[in-house]
Image (cartoon, rainbow, N blue to C red):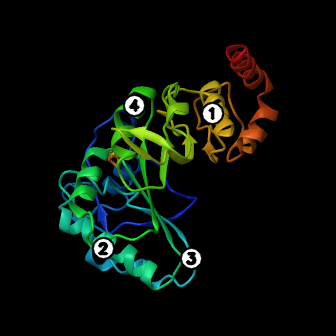
C-alpha cells in the first residue's frame, strides 16, 4: 500500500486512507493522490486522499481483462479502513467472485494494516454468496511488534495468507512462528503464511533497513519452504544492496551476502545441537 505495485496489476475501486502505523510516514499513495491525482480520475480536489472514496466506474474493470492477472486490490488506500462501508467491500468481492465464475483466472491480493476490521468483515460475510476462492489475504508489517499484533487477525481470515514486510524498519524475529501449513490460532488450525514480499524504503527521506534483517527473513522463508519475494532493498539499506540483487530469491541472496547468511546458519545449527 505504501509503494508502487510494479509487480502486479492494480485495481482501485476504493481509494484513500489515514496513517495508522510508522510504515505510513512516507505513504506513496498519499503522495500521489495529493499531487498528480488531485482533482483527477475521481480523486477529490479537496482532501484527495480522504478514506472511502468510491470509484463506481472501476468496479467491473477486472471483468474486462481477458488474460489471467495477478491483481493488487487497493494499492491507493486501505480497503478495510473504518470509513469503507461493508456493502462497498462486498461489491469488491462480488467482482472477484464474478471473475472466478467467468473462469478468468485472476488472483487478487488483498493487503491491509487493519486486519481486525478485515476479520470482522469475513465474520459477518461468512456463508454469503459473494465470497470466492481467488483471493489471498495479507497484512503489512514493518517490524516484529506490528507483525505480532496483526498476524492473529490475519490467520483467522480465509487464506492463503501473505505478508508484506515493507518498508522493513526492523527485524522480524518472530517470522518463523507464522510460516507453514498448519498453525494453531485460538484453538483452531489454520494456514500460516504462504508467501512473503519484502522491500526497503526509497527516496530522499528513506529510513534505514538492514540487509541482515532481509537476509534472516529470507532464511526463515527458505527453511520453511515459503516463497520469498525481494522487491528491492530500497535506497537506505545497510550494507547497501545493489539493484542487481533486488528481486532475487533467498538462494541468490545467500550467494551475495554469504557472511550474514552463514553466521545465521551457524547460529541455527548451534541451537539445533
Ligand atoms: S495504511 Fe497504507 S495506504 Fe494507508 S496511509 Fe498507511 S501506507 Fe498509506
Give neighbour class at mark 3: few <14, some 14-19, many 20+ (Cα, 10 Å): few
| SS at badge 2 | loop
**3 vs 2, front mark:** 2
| SS at badge 3 | loop
Tell me the residue that label 3 is attached to.
68
Question: Counting residues from the N terminus, which is met first, the one under dot 4 or under dot 3?
Answer: 3
Give neighbour class at mark 2: few <14, some 14-19, many 20+ (Cα, 10 Å): some
Q: Is residue 261 left or right of residue 176?
A: right
**1 vs 3, front mark:** 1
Tell me the residue that label 2 is attached to.
130
Instruction: Calculate the distance from the C-alpha at mark 3 to the C-alpha at mark 2.
Output: 20 Å
Q: Residue 165, percent across and down? A: 50, 39
Instruction: Calculate the distance from the C-alpha at mark 1 to the C-alpha at mark 3.
Output: 30 Å
Q: Is residue 186 left or right of residue 180?
A: left
Q: Residue at x 65, y 36 (%)?
A: 218
Instruction: Calculate the distance from the C-alpha at mark 4 to the C-alpha at mark 2.
Output: 30 Å
Q: Is residue 94 left or right of residue 88?
A: right
| SS at badge 1 | helix
Q: Is residue 151 left or right of residue 162?
A: left
Tell me the residue that label 4 is attached to.
148
**4 vs 3, front mark:** 4
Question: Counting residues from the N terminus, which is met first, the one under dot 4 or under dot 2?
Answer: 2
Q: Residue 244, percent across and down? A: 75, 44
Tell me the residue that label 1 is attached to.
220
Instruction: Calculate the distance from the C-alpha at mark 2 to the C-alpha at mark 1.
Output: 35 Å
Whether residues under marks 1 and 3 lie with C-beta atoms below 8 angstroms apart, the answer is no
Q: Does residue 114 show up?
A: no
Question: Counting residues from the N terminus, which is met first, the one under dot 4 or under dot 1?
Answer: 4
Instruction: Calculate the distance from the C-alpha at mark 4 to the C-alpha at mark 1.
Output: 16 Å
Amino acid at each position: 500500500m505504501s509503494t508502487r505495485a510494479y509487480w502486479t496489476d492494480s485495481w482501485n475501486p476504493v481509494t484513500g486512507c489515514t496513517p495508522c502505523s510508522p510504515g505510513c510516514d512516507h505513504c506513496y499513495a498519499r503522495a500521489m493522490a495529493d499531487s498528480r491525482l488531485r482533482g483527477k480520475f475521481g480523486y477529490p480536489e479537496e482532501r484527495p486522499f480522504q478514506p472511502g472514496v468510491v470509484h463506481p466506474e472501476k468496479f467491473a474493470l477486472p471483468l474486462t481483462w481477458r488474460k489471467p492477472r495477478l491483481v493488487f486490490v487497493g494499492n491507493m488506500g486501505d480497503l478495510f479502513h473504518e470509513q469503507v462501508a461493508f456493502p462497498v467491500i462486498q461489491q469488491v468481492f462480488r467482482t472477484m467472485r464474478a471473475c472466478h465464475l467467468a473462469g478468468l483466472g485472476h488472483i487478487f491480493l488483498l493487503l491491509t494494516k487493519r486486519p481486525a476490521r478485515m476479520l470482522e468483515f469475513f465474520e459477518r460475510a461468512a456463508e454469503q454468496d459473494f465470497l470466492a476462492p481467488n483471493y489471498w489475504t495479507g497484512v503489512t508489517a514493518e517490524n516484529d511488534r506490528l507483525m505480532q499484533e496483526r498476524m492473529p487477525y490475519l490467520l483467522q481470515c480465509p487464506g492463503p495468507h501473505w505478508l508484506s514486510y515493507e518498508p522493513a524498519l526492523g527485524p522480524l524475529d518472530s517470522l518463523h512462528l507464522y510460516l507453514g501449513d498448519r498453525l494453531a490460532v485460538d484453538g483452531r488450525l489454520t494456514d500460516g503464511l504462504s508467501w512473503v514480499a519484502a522491500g526497503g524504503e526509497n527516496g530522499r527521506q528513506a529510513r534505514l533497513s538492514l540487509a541482515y534483517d532481509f537476509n534472516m527473513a529470507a532464511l526463515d522463508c527458505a527453511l520453511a519452504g515459503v516463497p520469498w519475494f525481494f522487491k528491492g532493498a530500497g535506497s537506505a539499506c545497510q550494507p547497501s544492496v545493489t539493484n542487481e540483487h533486488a528481486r532475487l530469491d533467498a538462494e541468490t541472496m545467500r550467494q551475495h551476502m554469504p557472511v550474514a547468511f552463514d553466521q545465521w546458519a551457524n547460529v541455527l545449527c548451534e541451537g539445533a545441537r
